[in-house]
Image (spheres, rainbow, N blue to C red):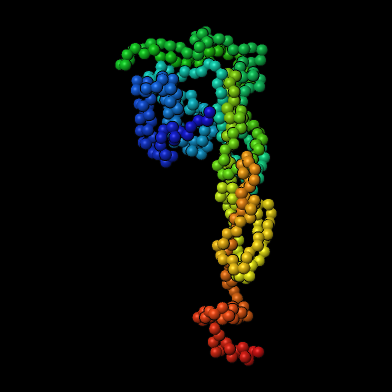
Amino acid sequence: MAKRDYYEVLGVPRGASQEDIKKAYRKLARQYHPDAYKGSKEEAEAKFKEIAEAYAVLSDPDKRAAYDQFGHAATDGQGFGAGGFGGFGADFGGLGDIFDMFFGGMGRQRTGPQKGSDLRVNLEISFKEAAFGVERDIQVPRTETCDTCGGSGAAPGSRPKTCSVCQGTGQVQYASHTPFGRIVQSHTCEACRGTGKVIERPCPTCRGAGQIKKFRTIHVKIPAGVDDGSRLRLSGEGEAGLRGGPPGDLYVYILVRPHKFFRREGNDVICDVDISFVQAALGDVIEVPTLDGTADLKLPEGTQTGTVFRIKGKGIPYLNGSGRGDQHVRVKVVTPTKLNEKQKDLLREFAKLSGEKPPKGSEKNIFEKMKDAFMG
């Protein structure tokens, strides 16, 4: 399951100040205190972990800037996805003491199989590629299971042993007296770091981690009809799981570059076409660009500027469906800016025949008429 947006977790806008973030965190921490929360302890613990992780990132300017730019896939060179930002996933920015007081041990780790984290990448495509689909190879940085040790972390020919300190539980407990009474706290076993296993001969490839960082080339098929902001889910292409757990998923977010001529509204394509005064008045058949090439469009006599014509079936294909939208062509009558005298005379004659008075200043003065008479 993909992580929730950290701003959403704390209930603050993206432009929130550090003070607002701190207030929101404190309020939520009190709300999910086990003595105040009406739900189960497990639910309170899960909520608090999510809140603490969000606060650890958003309260740190550098981590917040990286998160704003790259989301959960942000990295500072030490990790991708979960555990990135220099490994904040391990202690949530030093909030372990608070969590220890609430739940008896922030460092509690799962010892069974755990699904890998989801990843996100942004992919930019053209307007036409979004309309008709495209296939791309993308480079994805991710954690993968070490091929040398198969994820055990132990060198070939050896295997991890059960931790003698925690007897394989990954946890050690001790009781302490606090102002709230006697509290039994569970902490991660330092000998095995919560895994319940001790590796005496680490794998030379992954150095005992059981996982390595790789850039993996993944082939992505983008279906016809996707729009800007569409999201594709590639199951199992995220981070590798832990202790035999399944890998996470990869989410590809589509960014569509604007087109210089076409615009999109749903599955329809919109465009503007200039026509001349003569074409508008007498009618014509013009060629109009479409996503498939060109198409003939018939203009009736007396076409007015701003009139919209529809070319059926020349729009965007319906995503995961059949058929296409339409193309809507809005015409604009362009007024000529440079006319010779003959053209002007014809327009004056047209105005007279139409019963219109010639525009002021458009009639020839006495000197122009004399010039025409002498020049023939």
Q: Is residue 285 above or below residue 27?
A: below
Could you tell whether 241 is left or right of 96 in the image?
right
Q: Is residue 76 visible?
A: no
Quarter of the figure with residue 21: top left
Q: Which residue is located at x 56 percent, y 65 percent?
A: 305
Could you say which is closer to the camera, residue 17 or residue 241? Answer: 241
Q: On screen, 326 above or below 177?
A: below
Is residue 133 shown left or right of residue 108? Answer: right
Asked whether 78 or 59 is in front, the reply is: 59
On the image, which quarter does residue 119 sit in?
top right
Q: Which residue sits at x=49%, y=26%?
A: 89
| Coordinates of residue 152 in the picture (x, y in percent) | 61, 17
- Quarter where residue 100 is shown: top left
Residue farthest along the left direction in this orientation:
179
Total label count? 0
Residue 156 on image: x %, y %: 66, 15
Instruction: Write the residue at 63% across / 91% down.
Output: 374
Q: Position of residue 319 (x, y in %)?
A: 61, 42
Q: Tell me the quarter of the image containing the C terminus.
A: bottom right
Residue 109 as seen in the image, left or right of residue 208: left
Given residues 314 and 167, the one toward you in this image is 314
126, above or below 283, in the image: above
Tell me which residue sits at (64%, 31%) in the image.
216
| Residue 46 visible in this rendered orientation of the protein | yes
Where does the image place residue 243, in percent across and percent down from the top left?
Answer: 58, 18
